[in-house]
Amino acid sequence: MNLQEYTSSAYNFEECTKCTVCTAYCPVLGVNPMYPGPKQAGPDGERLRLKDPYFFNYALKYCMNCKRCEVACPSGVNVADLIQAARIKYEKGKPKLRDVILANTDFMGTLARPFAPIVNGVTGMGITKSVLDATMKIDRHRTFPKYSSRSFEGWLGRHRKEQAEYPEQVAYYHGCYVNYNYPQLGKDLVKVLNALGVGVQLLDGEKCCGVAMIANRLTAQAKKNATHNVEVLKKAVDAGLKVVTTSSTCTLTIRDEYPHLLDIDNSAVRDSLLLATRFIFEKLENGATLEFKPGFHMKVAYHVPCHMEKLGWGVFSEKLLRMIPGVEFTLLDSNCCGIAGTYGFKKENYEFSQTIGAPLFDQIRTVNPDIVACDCETCKWQIEMSTDHKVMHPVSILAKALKDND
Amino acid sequence: MKHDTVIIGGGLTGLLAGINLQKAGQSTIIVSSGQNALHFFSGAFESISELPPLVADTFAEAGVRVHYKEGVSLLPMGNFRKSFLSLEDLDIFPEAKFASKALVVNFMGYHDFFSSFIAEGLENAGIQTRIRFIRLPEMEHLRQSPSEMRSVQIARTMDRIWEKVVQEIRMLLKDEDAVILPQVFGLQDTTVPGRIREAIPAKVVFTGTLPPSVPGVRTIIQLRRRYEVLGGTYLMGDQVIKAHVHDNTVHSVATKNLESHYLEGRSFILSSGGFFSKGLTSTPSRIFEPVFGLDIEYPEDRNAWYNPDFMGRQPYMEFGVKVDQDLHAISGGVPYTNLYAAGGILGYSSPGLGYAGGMAINSAFKVVDQILKDTRA
Ligand SMILES: Cc1cc2nc3c(=O)[nH]c(=O)nc-3n(C[C@H](O)[C@H](O)[C@H](O)COP(=O)(O)OP(=O)(O)OC[C@H]3O[C@@H](n4cnc5c(N)ncnc54)[C@H](O)[C@@H]3O)c2cc1C
Ligand code: SF4
Ligand code: SF4
């Protein structure tokens, strides 16, 4: 593991002043008594583990890798990296079949998509959910993300020619979710970027960023995907393209987890990988304009996903939403929704997951917006399952507010 | 990204300044590399003796309730200190002997509340004291991980089960006219401390614990929410690493997360705190302010930086960045035109502003007035 390059010391744990601040912000510590908490699992535990791996505690698996401890730490300790790195290094035994299945989002997507109506029907059925619950320990309360029968890649491929005509070009790392579950977000992005005079290209064959593989300890597989992605990203960057993304989690994974946890050098591409909201904001700041529908009105409550808090780029989504005429904006308090990717799908985590999310759900009910805005796909599932409110990506809200040019 | 004022450091100082600049119609952004000194706060603001009406309003509008009267407060180590202003949780008494008999109550297994020191302090003040521990089934799960049985975790449970604690205390209470409890109530539900006070037939006194400080964490959440409701932008977990300066004027700053996207502003406030918050840093040979390299006065001899008597007055606590009368920060002897320093980063040596929490409040209000004056000119 190569944290040293990125922090002031190996694992950065001696920067810890034992101030306990992180313990006040860990969502899991608040609800799950089996979890030792960020300070104990991170810097305190590291000191012991370095002496003897015997001290590795399997309860570290309860960490959601939400990074809230890192965001709060006044001393710059990479607490969550310490915990995840320890899991990679010391956790023994093969991952369960369930974890392998949950982790392989793109493989599942490829398999499921041609049969989307059937798969959606089957995973939506009570009986299937009960079977999954009993055999695989995937909680029966979960709603499975729906698979779309046509992939985003296919759609953009069909529009390649017209996209190439725009004077400025970007590549789009869409991730598994846009490709298999929700191509509409990709289409919305294309609409907004086109309105700014920017055409959108696919990368030369992207793979899943691997976040779920890291969380489920499929490290070798995650490394393979990471190496591949850095290669195709580099091709685009070498061709002079910026690469935009719409998922805060994929972005954080490729930019920071690749070097921190997987030891994959991404320095050639890191700075060129931008969330689309940042790219759009910067365009507008530099003089580009968007025309909005007259009379548009929407009450929007924005939830900043945990990984967006860590990236520190939620500000771009916030400012873009505030700038749309007719948007009545509320920033929701900084809270975790509780899902943390595949974490909340596991039966052993379901209850904790919902308890963690409760303050957010309560606030959404109180604010009662027309739409909850959020840049994360798994937050969307969680919020839509746990409240009666619909969630849209800020880019989709922009697209909806744009004046139709016909 | 452009704002009227960019605030570096989002502790008590940065938030109070941000709230009042937003109220004055400015657009502001706060960058804070992590949480702040309020997490270690006893509840009593030191060195304040006068409360400008604006301060009271600012707190009240954010939902932060305070006591403002002259007297003494009971501190976590059992000693009393002169106080004028405290968060509502912490009482201010006319004198140290505020009761004749006291019952100190702690939770079994909770080591961050020094009941025996407190009892000793009370006895010294002439208050007869008993210590009792309570044990509730709802708290047993917290004890599974004793190293993390901390104030904030207990407080989360207490928001739900405080009534059971009240029942236990009523059973323990004999002829005491005061009950001393750790400050682990009212983290989310701010009405809890008041309801406990009403439900117990004795004076209830909440006393500080080891960090995190529950009233401190709650206050920061309230102030941040108020700042954001007023339209302010708060970047938590990001750090200002570089400034772009020309002719003693700051044009923009770069942050760790935003990289090449600079934060531009007309005015800049440096409220990055003291050594604990890394607003000030030291090596064995040098003390410096890492973002702008502001002037700091300190003795060359390192031995003079600290007092070997651990509990004695520590010289390093007084070191701080230099400012002019109007809080313009000074570098190489020359004041910046639009960079102001306020709060913990000034050390204890700024005349007229006090020190610690009192100084954070005083300088936050002063810097807002000064910025509004300078930018109007
Ligand atoms: C342990 C402790 C206990 C205390 N107890 C009391 C008390 O009981 N009563 C009292 O009156 N006073 C107390 N004080 C002092 C008082 O808390 C402080 O004076 C006051 O809170 C300072 O507030 P501040 O906003 O100026 O700085 P801080 O609260 O220190 O906040 C500074 C913030 O700036 C951030 N920061 C630093 N560098 C950068 C950068 N480059 N970029 C972005 N952000 C940055 C830090 O992460 C931090 O969040 C205590 C102080 C400490 C350290
Ligand atoms: S917040 Fe940071 S310095 Fe404080 S205990 Fe946690 S890891 Fe250590
Ligand atoms: S990453 Fe999240 S869940 Fe894990 S220790 Fe940090 S705050 Fe807790």
Image: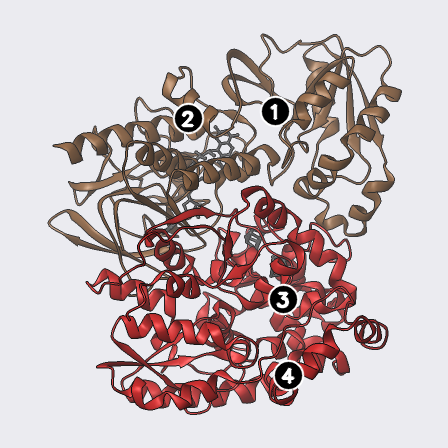
Chain colours: A red, B brown
Q: Residue beneath label 1, please?
A: B89
Q: CA distance from mark 3 to mark 2?
A: 40 Å
| Position above or below: A22 against B14 | below
The N terminus of chain A lies in quadrant: bottom right
Task: Inspect this view and state whether residue A308 appears.
Answer: yes
| Position above or below: B200 against B5 | above
Q: CA distance from mark 4 to mark 2?
A: 56 Å
Q: Front-most of B123 and A302? A: A302
Q: Nearer the viewer, mark 1 or mark 4?
A: 4
Task: Tell me if A261 is positioned left or right of B131 in this view.
Answer: left
Task: Tell me if B69 is positioned left or right of A51 in this view.
Answer: left
Q: Residue beneath label 2, please?
A: B58
Please rate how many residues cluster around mark 2, counting C-alpha atoms within 10 Å: few if below 14, some from 14 to 19, many from 20. Answer: some
Q: Nearer the viewer, mark 3 or mark 2?
A: 2
Q: Residue beneath label 4, please?
A: A116
The numbered mark at residue A83 is 3
Q: Amino acid at mark 2?
A: Thr
Please rate how many residues cluster around mark 1, counting C-alpha atoms within 10 Å: few if below 14, some from 14 to 19, many from 20. Answer: many
Q: Do marks 3 and 4 both belong to one polypeptide chain? A: yes
- The yes-or-no answer for disc 3 within 8 Å of ligand 3 is yes
**Mark 1 or mark 2, earlier in chain:** 2
As helix, strand or loop, the secondary structure at mark 4 comes to: helix
Circles 1 and 4 in contact, beta carbons < 8 Å = no
The numbered mark at residue B301 is none
Name the quadrant containing residue B361: top left
As helix, strand or loop, the secondary structure at mark 2 comes to: helix
Circles 1 and 2 in contact, beta carbons < 8 Å = no
Q: CA distance from mark 3 to mark 1?
A: 36 Å
Q: Quadrant of ligand 3?
A: bottom right
